[in-house]
Image: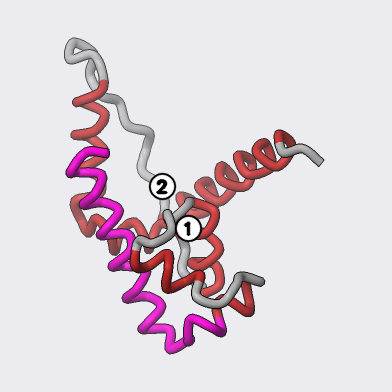
Amino acid sequence: MTPAMDEDIRRYRDVLRHLIERSGKPHRTIEDQLGWSRGAVSKLLSGTNELRVRQLLEILQNLGVGPMIFYRLVYGDTLSERILEELSASGDEEQPVVLPPAMSASEFDRRIEEAVTAALRREDRKLPG
């Protein structure tokens, strides 16, 4: 893992910790509501257990926070700039980066949720049993 990835993961955990604290919900309540074992939230926030996308989305949904809000809290107003940098760094320098037309935060949340739901369904179909 690169230092930049480590920093992103730390920021994800910090923002998630902040959102949980602001919600006033004890970890035990969130764990009970999600059907998780005792200590699961603490282990995710401390880095003892890896924070997975599904777990992140489950906690966010439990807290009533959409993915767009979460990512804005993680990256602030630099989110668009960061996306452009990532696209520029990974793409062919000769081709211009073309972004889709702007969309509302609710439309972005809806599209992210649809994409994640579709991906999770594909993963569920791959599981034996």
User: Which image quadrant: the N terminus?
Assistant: top left
Q: Which residue is mark 1?
A: 106
Res. 114 in view: yes
The residue that mark 2 highlights is 103
The boundaries of the magenta stretch are 1-29
Left of 15 or right of it: where is 54?
A: right
Q: Of 75 and 48, which appears nearest the observer?
A: 48
Residue located 60% across and 72% down the image: 37
Figure check: 103 above or below 42: above
Residue at the spot 72% in from the left edge and 38% down from the top edge = 127
Extreme top residue here? 94
* Mark 2 and mark 1: Cα distance apart in space: 8 Å
Q: Amino acid at mark 1?
A: Ser
Within 10 Å of the Cα at label 2, are there few (<14), some (14-19), or many (20+) other Cα atoms?
A: few
**What sort of colour scheme is used for the picture?**
secondary structure
Label drawn at residue 36: none
Residue 13: in magenta span? yes
Question: Judging from the image, what secondary structure is the residue with disc 1 in?
Answer: helix
Residue furthest to the front in view is 48
Residue 63 percent across, percent down from the top left: 50, 75
Expressed as whole percent of the image width and height from the top left, the position of residue 30 reads 55, 78
Q: Does the magenta segment cover residue 56?
A: no
| Residue 88 figure quarter | top left
Type of secondary structure dominating the magenta stretch: helix
The structure residue drawn at horizontal position 24% and vertical position 33%, both measured from the top left corner, is 86
Vertical placement of residue 22 versus 14, above or below? below
Three-letter amino acid code at disc 2? Met
